Amino acid sequence: MTGQTPSQTVGPFFHDSLSWPGAETLVGPDTKGERIEIVGRVLDGDGAPVPDALIEIWQANAAGRYAHPEDGQIKPIDPAFRGFGRCASDVEGRFRFATIRPGRVPGRGNALQAPHINLGLFARGLLRRLVTRIYFEDAAENTEDPVLALVQDPARRATLLARRVAGDGAVYRFDIVLQGNGETVFFEC
């Protein structure tokens, strides 16, 4: 046989091999900080749910320190906080994380960033993971964040903001739109 091999879609294999029970829960009974939930859906360009995506989050603890050896800040480490989680989307594209509201971390030039959660997404048809951030719509610090300031179009910036769900405690909604109208801002990494 000669010629090129036809291209094939990556996945869907995320549910079987990359997630584990409890990976969506970053907190334990002794975790310090304001407990929150992040809920949302992964949607394609037509607004249809993506049922086999894998969403990863990683974030600083409530004091603003990552559970990583390269974070040398003189801030407390919370041994009851994992700082990393994974969740596979369900048949309706839904996902849910139990975590805490992160503290501020320094960015370039030690400028403090607004509280945010880093997010990576793997899905069928993507050859590279997509990377974005979750900011909190009700955070006054957003006006000072150097990364959020890079997104100058207010409609595009809004795709990075998780909105508090009315009457549902500390639950924030963050939908991920892969392309088209309302596409989430994704960053180069």
Image: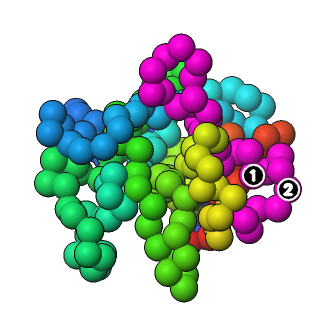
Q: Nearer the viewer, residue 153 or 119?
A: 153
Q: Which residues are magenta?
A: 149-175
Q: Quadrant of residue 40?
A: top right
Q: Is residue 83 visible?
A: yes
Dividing the image into 4 quarters, which one contains the N terminus? bottom right
Q: Quadrant of residue 164?
A: top right
* Residue 69 pos. (x, y %): 23, 75
Q: Nearer the viewer, residue 182 or 37?
A: 37
Name above or below for residue 72 compared with residue 62.
below
Circle 2 residues within 10 Å: few <14, some 14–19, many ≥20: few
For the residue marked with disc 2, what is the amino acid? Asp
Residue positioned 23% across, 34% down in the render:
22
Name above or below for residue 176 compared with residue 128.
above
Disc 2 designates what residue? Answer: 153
* Residue 61 pos. (x, y %): 32, 55
Callout 2–callout 1 Cβ contact below 8 Å: yes
